[in-house]
Amino acid sequence: MEKAPQELALITKYFSDFTQAQLQQFSALYALYLEWNEKINVVSRKDIASLYEKHVLHSLSIAAVFDFEKGMNVIDIGTGGGFPGLPLAIFFPGTHFHLVDSIGKKLKVVTEIASEIGLKNLSTEHIRAEEIKTKKFDVAVSRAVAPLKDLWKWAKPLLKKAGNPKQLPEEQIVPNGLICLKGGDLALEVAESHCRPRMIEISAIFSEEYFREKFLLYVSL
């Protein structure tokens, strides 16, 4: 089995207090994605060596700002190869993550990897978010799937209104709304969405060059 590049140093550089089980789960991802990517292309082949930076750590930027509490239900819209939902499910073992996508073969990879590393708080569904009619979630997350206008249109009907927001130390937020990962000049996209998202520069959280001009957008319910 090939050794994961960068090991876990890129993750533990910014996060601590992981259990041994969580560290083993993160460590196992590289070899598993490498193996599955040979069969089904879920991660760009030019990016596979940078899996921990461009996919895992990028996903965990959400965890640096938001605190998903035990018992919360989160939907990952258009999860693709499992990002950001799968790394977040490792990070927040008490929160349930439901990963949906319109491409079934990608979800097969996510399901198999989650099973291999023993994730019990992750489920998948081959469906478009706009086709979900009966489930409700506390939070929706997404990464570079569609314009904010569309993401909010799909996410809003799936969200249940939480109670009074909690005050957390270190400015962390218990979210109730849509969190999406996006990059580049977002001025027009935000204007067309008619939303007023909170925008957080990921480069202010992680120092790697890759995160320049990458943002977290949060639209609260």
Image (spheres, grey):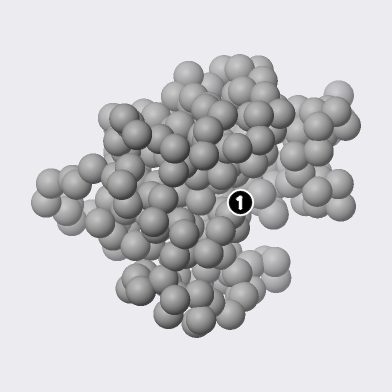
From where the camera sits, is residue 125 visible? yes
In front of the other: 64 or 10: 64
Name the image quarter holding residue 68: top left
| Residue at point 58%, 37% (across, down) | 101
Q: Residue furthest left?
A: 164
In this rendering, position of residue 93 left or right of residue 181: left
Quadrant assignment for the C terminus: bottom left
Q: Position of residue 140 (x, y in %)?
A: 40, 47
In this rendering, position of residue 198 left or right of residue 19: left
Quadrant assignment for the N terminus: top right
Q: Position of residue 18 (x, y in %)?
A: 49, 35
* Helix, strand or loop under label 1: helix
Q: Position of residue 122 (x, y in %)?
A: 49, 26
Q: Amino acid at mark 1?
A: Leu
| Residue at point 70%, 66% (across, down) | 210
In this rendering, position of residue 111 left or right of residue 160: right
Q: Position of residue 53 (x, y in %)?
A: 69, 53
Q: Up-down: is 159 above or below 36?
A: below
Q: Up-down: is 120 above or below 96?
A: above
Q: Which residue is mark 1?
A: 57
